[in-house]
Image: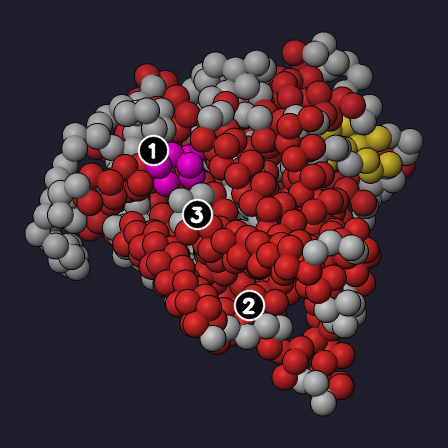
Amino acid sequence: MVLTVIQSLCFILFVGGCGYIAFRGFRNVYLNIMLGRSADYTDHPGERWKTMLMVALGQKKMFKRPVAAMLHLVIYVSFVITQVELIEIFIDGVFGTHRIIFHAWEHILVLRGLYVFAINLIEVLSVLTFIVTVAFLYRRDMLKLPRFNKPEMKGWPNMDAHIILFLEMFLITNIFIMNSFDMAAAHGEYGFWISGMIAHNWEGLNEGLIEVFEKIGWWGHLAGVFGFLMYLAHSKHLHILLAFPNTYFSRLTPKGYINNMPEVTREVKLMLDPNAQVEPAASDAPAKFGAKDIFDLTWKNLLDAYTCTECGRCTAQCPANMTGKLLSPRKIMMDTRDRMEEVREKMDANKGVWVDDGKNLIENGYISVEELRACTTCNACVEECPVNISPLDIIMQLRRSLIMEDSNSPNEWNGMFANLENNGAPWQFSPQDRLNWEKA
Amino acid sequence: MDIKVPTMAEMAANGQKPDVLFWVGCSGSFDQRAQRITRAFVKILNHLNIKYAVLGTEESCTGDPAKRAGNEFVYQMLAMQNIEVMNNYGVQEIVTTCPHCFNILKNEYPALGGKYRVRHHAQYLQELIDQGKIKLTDATSFKGKRITYHDSCYLGRANEIYEAPRKVLELLDAELVEMKSCKTKGLCCGAGGAQMFKEEEHGKLRINEARTLEALEVQPDIVASACPFCNTMLTDGVKGKDMQVSVKVFDIAELIAQGQGLDGF
């Protein structure tokens, strides 16, 4: 009895502590996203729900690469269904019970059958997931799939990917330790197929030892789950949660659409007609054109950055990257996120207040001008992203800042701008010659 | 041979209004290769007695290259001037042979007060074909020819128009083959985002070279495009590979005009 109480207390303390740490991580992610400019992505809720169901839940865009999609689907389904077992672990943990759901349904055989079926399903999926995880490691490290081995993946991002894959294997291993020793202890009463087969190996072991191993598996699985939860906010794996809000808040406009900057409209109207009726500026602060830092991007851009799981489909399809230029759309997202993390660290060190650190997202070890210049705005990255991220939206805003704030432009573009202003064409032709094509 | 092209100003002076404004665009107006696309499209319009007009000297760049380079000021100045001109003429329908003009007129002008029904000539030609108005007299001249269509980013991914240009090409008695990257996965020609107007960044090869290699892989007689900039890029690419004798780059309008026996090539 005392032992049960101590065990329950340990469980509650463990879950509470881990839960708190995980919560802190998620809170920081939320606060960072809220550092962005406001933008409205709430129109057409019906279409938004549909997009979320198709793209996040249904993984529609993943199926552009059917093999990868199937492998990913196995892990995804397995992850969702395994949570059933976690419910039981929670109840057992708090009340010091053992396999509470199984025993509670002693006399309701249909429900008990359903429970056994669920655990069996979890076990089958776990085996599949283990195989897929090995396949993913093989693909990453042995086949050296190009998109996983681009320069921006060196160091931490590569480590991050491995930590996640090994955590998955750790979780699955513990499920089988837990279930198989439980089967051994209960002499097969539960009727789990796969762990039942494993349990044959434990025959003849001391009963106390079997119980200890079962506890190791139980706690190991729990530790894996909470380790994962605490790690999530610091890893690229956040997509398992953020894919849902990120696809809900998708850009519903055609991909070719780039917004008209209202602050420019105001100035251009006044330039063309000093007496023009224009809406007053939203604030007295002098308008800043385009984005230099994360604060100038929209919250949606920042949510995009946290949702990115660094799969690199964008970069693999980017014509600039394909032909050896520096630009990698994935790196745009990774740099945006890294800058947010840097900003948060500095804010935390300064009681949550932001003091300009003289850095920003352009250069400073983040996104270089050369990368920004190489984009053809072809939308291949946007089309490709399985969770509707737009690297292009960030690239465009940074480009605007380069041109309109810093007058940082290649000479050829300066010439083009001058021609556009003077002749209404990007080349040096007279507007009077515009109809010359009708002459043979 | 000069072709007769009505302007909005002439029509207005005669108290007339065209059914559709043909937005020519800078490339179609000034680039020698693209002028041939413009002429081909106008020949089709004239041949079908479509009541259209161009803005002529009153047309300016839509502002697309400025905007995509990051210069929103120059873009909006041009846009507002163009919108004023078009609204004064009461323009309602626009057709254009340039996907960049098409995209910006359709998607970005409305918020600045320029609300028109905008179609790209791929859609426009497809409608005419569907209505039975375009009949090829010379379709057999394409018999046995292999044609591969290059998707323009601003028509394809940007506005999800993949089928219309292909439907137009189906009218020709030719064999249509797809490149390795097509439709949603279509590889850019390298001109968009104002890249046309500057040197490429340092890399292993040029984007138009990469795309040309994909096109040549399917051993076409004709590479079809629906964008004057793509056309320039691919023409350069084919020349760069010394294949210009056996592989021709044509706009879909040129191919249709050719199939209608409207000469000029």
Look at mark 1 in the image and give the residue it sits on: A399
Residues under labels 3 and 1: Cα distance? 34 Å
Look at mark 3 in the image and give the residue it sits on: A231
Q: Earlier in the sequence, mark 3 or mark 2?
A: 2
The residue range painted magenta reads: A331-338
Does residue A239 appear in this view? no
Amino acid type, label 3: Tyr
Q: At 90% across and 34% down in the image, what residue appears?
A: B143
Amino acid type, label 2: Ile
Residues under labels 1 and 2: Cα distance? 52 Å
Q: Nearer the viewer, residue B80 or B9?
A: B80
> In the visual, does B61 lie left or right of B231?
left
> In the visual, does B46 lie left or right of B83?
right
Q: Secondary structure at mark 2?
A: helix
Look at mark 2 in the image and give the residue it sits on: A89
Q: Secondary structure at mark 1?
A: helix
* Discs 3 and 1 carry the same chain letter: yes
Secondary structure mostly seen in magenta is helix
Q: At 43% across and 72% down in the image, what residue appears?
A: A2
